[in-house]
Image (tube, rainbow, N blue to C red):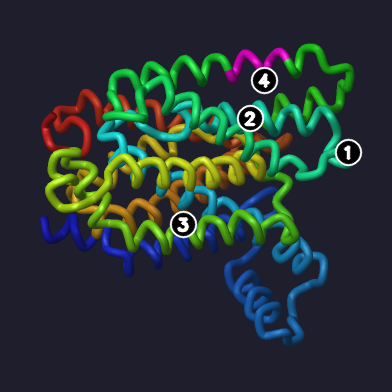
């Protein structure tokens, strides 16, 4: 058990994340030595001249570094969302994709893409956030958020809202007259980090960082919510109020990430379960480990998306589904159950 705890300790995971990002930057259609990558990173951060060829410097700093940073931030955010949602609603299947939040964001973002972002006051991110909030409100309303949330109703409501949002997204794409917009929206619904640029990183990184800091301060509350509303009342915690706050914050997070990267499934579902099997259910250990593990998982998944096909990028949602679905089945039927607790 001590070895398992060490393997999922924050210092070791932070080193593995740094190595994953370095590997992601180095490999691709053009392989770049790790020494050149480190030289460029140091020269850009310290604002000093670099001995690396300018063309290689441009590839590293303008293309690969923003993509790797966005992959790490998105993976951390999705894993965070999965951990918090599973604790908040006491359901091991809870995550933004399965509960319809990501699908709601996709409706707003697809509508924004096909309408043309230049004519919209808040752009794709604003519409994605609005769609995520509306989907969250609908799921909570159907599940009975005014009283105690039924976990069975929550999953069923999430499935229904998700199916409805997917149908709306497909309908919007089908009736659109813009062929280029249709292709962009269709590719976007499968998830992609190909458009990562420095100018687009500020908002998702700021939101992910702020919510990581906030939820790391809420680990005791998450532990209590996971154990049930009766215990929460005994300890003086307003579970319903906390749940609403958490769900709104996660809707904001999901909306921003979906608007930036499209729909990327299974990260928020699989990573928390895989990490929980090693760290236990205490969120003081689980949450940091899941955040680092989600960042590593999506960074390496994006590397596969870039390098598996010689002709171009695969949508990253395909990679996460191909890896996540078998892993989830293994966690589900492998004997340990959800979180390794045998239940």
Instruction: Identify whether 146 is placed above or below 287.
Output: above
User: In the rendered structure, are the residues bearing label 1 and label 3 in contact, judged by CB atoms less than 8 Å apart?
Assistant: no
Say whether disc 2 or disc 1 marks the residue closer to the N-terminus: 2
Which residue lies under the disc numbered 1? Answer: 119
Q: Residue drawn at (73%, 87%), measured in percent from left and top? A: 48
Q: Secondary structure at mark 3?
A: helix
Residue 291 percent across, percent down from the top left: 39, 54
Q: Residue drawn at (51%, 31%), measured in percent from left and top? A: 101
Q: Report which quarter residue 151 is drawn in.
A: top left
Mark 1 Cα within 10 Å, few/some/many (few <14, many 20+)? few
Say whether disc 3 or disc 4 marks the residue closer to the N-terminus: 4
The residue stretch that appears in magenta: 165-171
User: In the rendered structure, are the residues bearing label 3 and label 4 in contact, judged by CB atoms less than 8 Å apart?
Assistant: no
Say whether disc 4 or disc 1 marks the residue closer to the N-terminus: 1
Instruction: Identify whether 2 is placed above or below 182.
Output: below
Residue 106 is tagged as 2
User: In the rendered structure, are the residues bearing label 2 and label 4 in contact, judged by CB atoms less than 8 Å apart?
Assistant: yes
Q: Residue drawn at (58%, 59%), measured in percent from left and top? A: 205
Which residue lies under the disc numbered 3? Answer: 211
Residue 40 percent across, percent down from the top left: 68, 74
């Amino acid at each position: 058990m001590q070895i398992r705890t060490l393997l999922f300790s924050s210092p070791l995971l932070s080193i593995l994340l740094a190595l994953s990002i370095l590997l992601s930057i180095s490999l691709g259609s053009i392989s770049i030595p790790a020494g050149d990558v480190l030289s460029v990173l140091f020269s850009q951060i310290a604002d000093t001249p670099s001995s690396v060829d300018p063309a290689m410097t441009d590839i590293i700093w303008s293309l690969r570094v923003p993509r790797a940073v966005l992959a790490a931030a998105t993976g951390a955010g999705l894993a965070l969302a999965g951990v918090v949602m599973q604790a908040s609603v006491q359901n091991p299947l809870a995550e933004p994709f399965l509960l319809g939040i990501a699908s709601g964001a996709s409706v707003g973002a697809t509508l924004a893409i096909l309408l043309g972002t230049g004519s919209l006051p808040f752009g794709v991110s604003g519409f994605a956030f609005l769609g995520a909030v509306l989907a969250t409100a609908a799921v909570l309303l159907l599940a009975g958020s005014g009283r105690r949330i039924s976990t069975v109703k929550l999953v069923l409501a999430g499935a229904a809202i998700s199916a409805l949002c997917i149908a709306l997204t497909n309908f919007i794409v089908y009736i659109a007259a813009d062929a280029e917009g249709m292709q962009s929206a269709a590719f976007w619904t499968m998830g992609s980090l190909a458009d990562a640029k420095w100018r687009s990183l500020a908002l998702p990184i700021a939101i992910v960082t702020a919510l990581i800091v906030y939820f790391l301060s809420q680990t005791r509350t998450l532990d209590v919510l996971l154990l049930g509303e009766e215990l929460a009342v005994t300890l003086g915690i307003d579970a319903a109020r906390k749940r609403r706050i958490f769900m709104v914050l996660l809707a904001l997070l999901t909306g921003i990430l979906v608007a930036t990267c499209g729909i990327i499934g299974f990260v928020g579902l699989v990573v928390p379960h895989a990490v929980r099997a090693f760290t236990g259910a205490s969120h003081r250990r689980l949450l940091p480990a899941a955040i680092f593990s989600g960042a590593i998982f999506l960074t390496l998944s994006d590397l596969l998306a870039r390098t598996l096909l010689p002709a171009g990028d695969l949508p990253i949602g395909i990679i996460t589904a191909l890896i996540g679905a078998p892993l989830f089945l293994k966690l589900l039927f492998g004997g340990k159950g959800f979180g390794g607790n045998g239940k």
